[in-house]
Structures are given as structure tokens and as C-alpha cells.
Image (cartoon, helix red, strand yellow):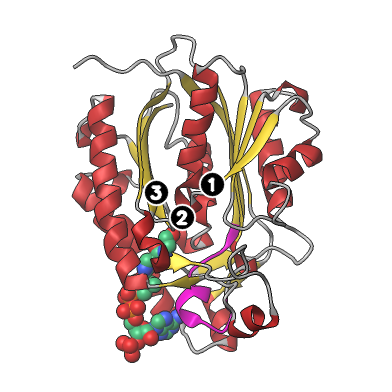
Amino acid sequence: MIKPTPIAEIVATGRFLPDNVVTNDDLAERMDTSDEWIRTRTGISERRIAPDDMGAADLGARAATIALQRAGLEPGEIDILVVSTATPDRWLPSTACDIQALLKCDNAVAFDIMAACTGHLYGLSMAEGYLAAGRGEVALVIAAEKMSAILDWNDRTTAVLFGDGAGAAVLRPSNGSGRGILSSHHQSDGKLAELLYRPGGGALDPISQSVLDEGRHLLKMQGREIFKNAVRSMAEACDIAMQKAGWTANDVDLLVPHQANIRIIEATAKYAGIPMEKVFVNVDRYGNMSSATVPIALDEAIEQGRAGPDANVMTVAFGAGLTWGAMALRM
Ligand code: UT7
């Protein structure tokens, strides 16, 4: 099979996590849960929670600043700024425009995409398309999530699962290096939207006293259904992206999966035929940060030398929409 020629490569990454660590025991003091339940059912030990005055744009700008420094680029050199977030600071304008103002990257076209936990992979593909079309030389793809702001802190079935954080990646054209995005596969199924959603507070059911009283603006999830769909979809997406990249499971040096639940990660790796030694896990320290999990995990993997030059890295994610996708990267 002819190996695909990558169009765009990740030249630098960055991450930002708020300082405030909230442990399972901290949560057990405010709701009916326990460290034992959370760890055995999810693999999560602690998560970071951003302060009230730090929003998604702030989180994202901090991760992006690190990625830009590592890439040796000035903000003015960014042509395309794509931000994925399920927790925009405000409904208008986009969080991307707010981040653009913070970074002072005045020459960029800036816009948000909404694909929940899969958002960073969709964002990378969107940026890849812009670069392929010759619409610029430098793309900055950010995932910024302040999940703590949309959680129902009285609902133990969701409140214990999520955390706040941001990750960023700088993409440039590949220039024949053989490194970059080798393949991707993205999919969605809107029929399953109500398995994981925020029912109210939008255009159809605008913010009102009844929305607030009933908490319809907060995240609702059918955990078991999401679990089943997550494993099936991520395993399938991995298979398709591997095939398109001309890889078998043996060719994967590292799997960087969405970090929602260690049991989902283990089941996905098993279906994909990738042993756990080759799987990056940090869900224990951060919980589920929606679209920010993949770029933060990738950044940590690079820092730890687990995704060094020429490594074959498979990323895979799943989330509300439902959306899912996988991307094969040659680092
Ligand atoms: O980014 C994608 C978004 N989300 C996900 O990927 C999440 C996918 N789903 C999951 O990770 C799992 O389904 C959960 C972690 C959410 C739940 O684990 P589970 O093994 O599916 O548990 P369950 O929902 O079947 O609940 C088992 C029991 C229930 O009690 P009963 O009915 O058996 O008496 C729950 O009420 O655990 C109870 N429970 C809790 N107990 C202590 C639910 N949440 C908690 C809690 N602490 N925080």
C-alpha cells in the first residue's frame, strides 16, 4: 500500500492546568461519593479546577503561549486560529476571538468549533484543510475547557468525572519531511445527542428562572450508554485511521486516547490490539477535560519522550454529539 504523504505537521504543543487540585476525598466531603467508588469506576484520583476569574479563553491563551514559544513563533505569524470548547466564556463572540485578543495574533482568522470531547481532532483536521488549501502557513489549534462551570455540583454521577484545562498545537505544512497527520477519520451521530447534553439555556429554551431552577443549563449524561458507544466508536475509528495510514496495531508506538475513564481506555486499547504499555494515561490526575484531554496528553507524552521524533502516534476521542474520531500522526 502507498504510504500517505502528510500535508501538515504538529511542530509544537503546550498545555495549561490550573493550580487548584481537588481530590476525590475533597468531593466526598460535599456529596455522597467516595474515593474508592471514583477510583474503581473511573480511574480518576484528582482533577484541576480553575478559579472563578479564569475562563476558557484565559486557559487556552496560556497553553497557546507555551506552544508558540516552543515553535519559535510570534503571535503575529499565526494565520489560522481554531478553538474547540464546550464551555465558551460567553455566547458571543467566539472564544477564538477572545483568545485572539489575548494573544494579539491580529493577522489570524479565528473561529470556534463545537465537537465536544472530539473537538481537538476535528480542529486539527480543519487547520490541516486550511493549510492544504494554501490559506496560510501557521495554524494554532487550541482546546480549552472549563468543565467545572457547566457541572451540576449536586449530581454525583457527573460532578466527579470532569476537570479544567487547556492544550494547544501549532501546525505547519509538512514540506516533504514525512512527519505529520498521516490519516484521520471523523464521524458523528446527532440522533444520540441526548445521551450527553445541556438541555436548556440556548436559543430554543433561553435562560429563564425555570432553566436555572431546574438546572437545565447544566450537563446531563447517561453514563452507561455513553460508555458502550465510546468503546465501540473509538475502536472502529482507530481501525479506520490505522488502515488509511497503512499501519497495523504493531506499528503504533503510542496510543493517546481521550481521557474519560480508565475502563473505556483499556477496552478501546484491547479492541484496537494495542497493549497498555503503549497507551498514554493521565485521567488519574486530571479527570475528563473534554476536548483538552488529547492535546494535554500529547504534550505530556512528548515531554516524557514517549512521542519523540518519528514515533507513530494514534490519537482517538469520543464525546457529545455524539462525535468521535481518530488521527494517525508521525511525530
Ligand atoms: O467524554 C465522554 C463523556 N463521558 C464519558 O465517557 C463517561 C462514560 N461513562 C462512564 O464512565 C461510566 O458509565 C460512569 C463512570 C459514569 C459510571 O460508571 P458505571 O459503572 O456505569 O456506574 P453506573 O452508572 O451503572 O452506577 C452504578 C452505581 C449506581 O447505584 P445503584 O443504582 O447501583 O444503586 C449509581 O447511583 O453507582 C452509583 N453512583 C455513584 N456512587 C458513588 C453513580 N455515581 C456515583 C458516585 N459515587 N459519584
**Reading the chain from its start, which is encountered first: label 2 or label 3?**
2
| Disc 3 residue type (three-letter) | Ala
- Nearer the observer, disc 2 or disc 3? 3
Q: Which of 170 and 57 is in front in this view?
A: 57
- Under tag 2, what secondary structure? loop
Q: Nearer the viewer, residue 28 or 108?
A: 108
| Disc 1 residue type (three-letter) | Ile
Q: What stretch is highlighted in magenta?
A: 152-164
Residue visible at 59% across and 84% down in the picture: 214
> Mark 2 and mark 3: span between their CA atoms?
14 Å
Residue at numbered disc 3: 317
- Nearer the observer, disc 2 or disc 1? 1
Residue visible at 37% across and 71% down in the picture: 223
Q: Which mark is residue 282?
A: 2
> Mark 1 and mark 3: span between their CA atoms?
13 Å
Tell me the quadrant of ligand 1: bottom left
